[in-house]
Amino acid sequence: MLRYFIGFKTGIWMKRWRCPDCKAVHTTRPIQYCPGIQYTRHQQVLSLFSKLSRNYFLKSIPRQTQQHWRKLFLRQLHKKNNWGNPIGYLQNKLKTGQFWLTKRTILYENWSSAIAPYLSFALTTKGQSFRLE
């Protein structure tokens, strides 16, 4: 599927697949882009730091988009009851690598430690013989 991201002149072909368990369609994307967002995380962080520290938005990104990011960030602050130091909260999230500014739920699983739903080896068993008695 052809996807468009800010910073690329043309669309990028992305791999899609349907999950056999949940039947949802999943699409790959570049690592620096959040799901549902066409801007990089770096651009989102620069916008938030600019608005929180200097009280103005960046001129290179539409104001409405930056207002949406700020609203999502304030919603995250509200959930964590951390109104006193928004810049410190943002820096802490960036240090831990847990900064995702999107409404969508981000689910990442460490596959090396996950319990596989299927056996990791082949298994054949001999079934019981069938008798009509």
Image (cartoon, grey):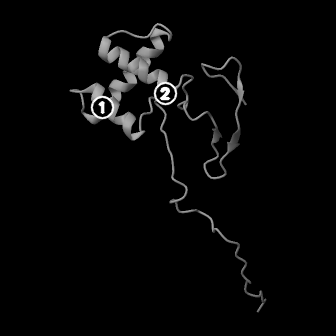
Residue occupying the point 57% across, 35% down: 31
- Mark 2 is surrounded, within 10 Å at the Cα level, by few (under 14), some (14 to 19) or many (20 or more) other residues, namely some
- Mark 1 is surrounded, within 10 Å at the Cα level, by few (under 14), some (14 to 19) or many (20 or more) other residues, namely some
Residue occupying the point 73% across, 78% down: 124
Q: Closest to the observer: 131 or 105?
A: 105
Residue type, numbered disc 2: Arg
**Quarter of the image holding residue 111?**
bottom right
Residue occupying the point 42% across, 24% down: 45
Q: Which residue is mark 2?
A: 41
Residue occupying the point 42% across, 17% down: 47
Judge whether 74 appears above or below 99 on screen. Answer: above
In x, y percent, where is residue 27? 65, 37
Report the quarter where the C terminus lies: bottom right
Q: Closest to the observer: 35 or 20?
A: 35
What mark, if any, has residue 89 been given in the picture? Answer: 1
Q: Secondary structure at mark 1?
A: helix
In x, y percent, where is residue 38? 57, 23
Residue occupying the far bottom of the picture: 133
Q: Secondary structure at mark 2?
A: helix
In x, y percent, where is residue 70? 38, 20
Report the quarter where the N terminus lies: top right
